[in-house]
Amino acid sequence: MTQEQWGEIRQRLLKTVGQNNYTTWIEPLVPGQVANGIAILNVPTNFFGNYVSQNFSDLILHELNAEGITASRLNFVLSSQTNAAPKAQQTTTLRATSAQKTGGMNSTAPLEPRFSFDNFVVGKPNELAHAAARRVAEGGPVTFNPLFLYGGVGLGKTHLMHAIAQELQQRKPEMNVLYLSAEQFMYRFVQALRDRKMMDFKELFRSVDVLMVDDVQFIAGKDSTQEEFFHTFNALVDQHKQIIISADRAPTDIKDLEERVKSRLQCGLVVDLHPTDYELRLGILQSKLETQQKNYPDLEVGEGVLEFLAHRITSNVRVLEGALTRLFAFASLVGREINMDLTQDCLADVLRSNERKITVEEIQRKVSEHFNIRLSDMIGPKRLRSFARPRQIAMYLSKQLTSRSLPEIGRRFGGRDHTTVMHGVRRIEELKQSDSQIAEDLELLGRALKS
Ligand SMILES: Nc1ncnc2c1ncn2[C@@H]1O[C@H](COP(=O)(O)OP(=O)(O)OP(=O)(O)O)[C@@H](O)[C@H]1O
């Protein structure tokens, strides 16, 4: 059943059952395959399935048939992939059918049609990640396993993951592609344990051709899930099956992740989605503008507005996108044209938050957390290398990321002299060139502080 057909059916059900019943019982249903007169509907719990079966089965069957879908029976399948799941609520769902197999535990997570390669704007900061994603989406022989994509919030990891899954479905419909978030992996694992269906779980995950797990940092600290993930991972790698993983940071930086899992995650290709630069932001805005103009054909965007937004909204692409959507909605509601005045009025809060200044105190806190030392040791007098180096790094970042003078920075580091700060800053400048670990720490901290 296509998404459009299900959309029609839902609309008619809404009219028949009323808004309350619709929101509670119909909206969370996710349709699966229809075969041999049986239509599959994914439900979040058994109770839910029983209730819908007893109260709405006939109506749903009637509407399915009215839509030209021949079904005489509904089969309610327990699945975490229903519209009641948090991610699913955010997206228009397109069910992937390739992974529909036994027991309802195997459906892929909903894919957002908008998250395609065509809609992904490529610039310097994301070109490597994009190229790698394109390569695995060809579905050819596995060259790097896993592909590990990482980057800060809202920089396009999920977009790329969905694009890969959708491209694979189009190019290689015979392939069994399973895409899910790490949270869903855990959810299914727990469910399998509870329902004593571990064999089904293992079989499902070991029988896929491509396994895609989004936001893998989620399993950090969850020992049994990590263990199971590790075994699944190994089994698939042994069978030369492609694995694609995303996370908000590099494998080495995920705390509470077992070393063996970390090392496994690093053994393929690890690529980074860097924070956007001005040109990429402008390109993304231009591309999103086309979509907005389809919805609001009468609205034009005044000169300089996109450039202004690309310049001022640097935090992440999601915020940038939201700002443009808000501008169009606002302009159409108040009947004003989209010019600089309207932009300043409508986006005052977004612009203010993007203006946020980084403080020395924040830097000290982040750096102490990163190196696992106490804030008091960072600021205090101790000269041990394990405190002195993070202190110098914090001084360096304070000089780079704030407008504070050296004496002002010195005062915030327990009243140190400005020459001490200067020495620290110079030392880190040197180490940045010669010590790749320090360069990486600086990059990571800088990114975390700016996001
Ligand atoms: N290069 C790009 N071109 C077009 N749209 C983009 C690009 N990068 C990000 N976006 C858009 O920005 C939004 C956020 O992207 P996405 O959800 O993929 O981020 P993420 O990295 O997964 O973030 P999170 O860490 O919050 O899960 C999406 O609407 C996505 O389409």
Image (cartoon, rainbow, N blue to C red):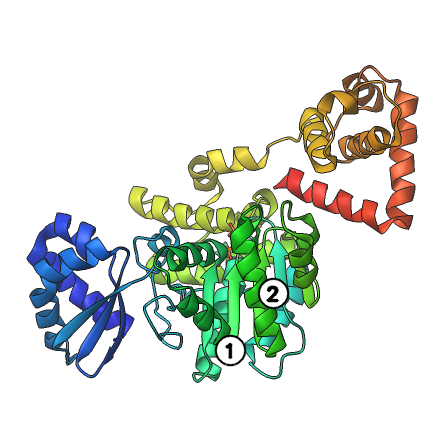
* Residue 191 placement (x, y as % from top left): 38, 56
Instruction: Give residue 174's position: percent from left, percent from top.
Output: 44, 85
Q: Which residue is mark 2?
A: 122
Q: Amino acid at mark 1?
A: Asp
In the figure, is residue 423 to the left or right of 247? right
Q: List the residue tagged with mark 1.
A: 209
Residue 303 visible in the current orientation: no
SS under mark 1: loop
Asked if the residue at tag 1 contacts the one at tag 2, i.e. Cβ–Cβ closer than 8 Å, the answer is no
Pick whichever, 235 or 119, lies toward us. 235
**Residue 218, how many percent across, how many down?**
53, 50
Write the residue at 20% across / 54% down.
Answer: 47
> From the viewer's perspective, is 50 left or right of 79?
left
Is the CB of mark 2 within 8 Å of ligand 1?
Answer: yes
Front position in the image: 300 or 434: 434
Counting residues from the N terminus, which is met first, the one under dot 2 or under dot 1? 2
Disc 2/disc 1 C-alpha distance (Å): 28 Å
Q: Amino acid at mark 2?
A: Val
Q: What SS does tag 2 mark? A: loop
Q: Is residue 142 above or below residue 3?
A: below
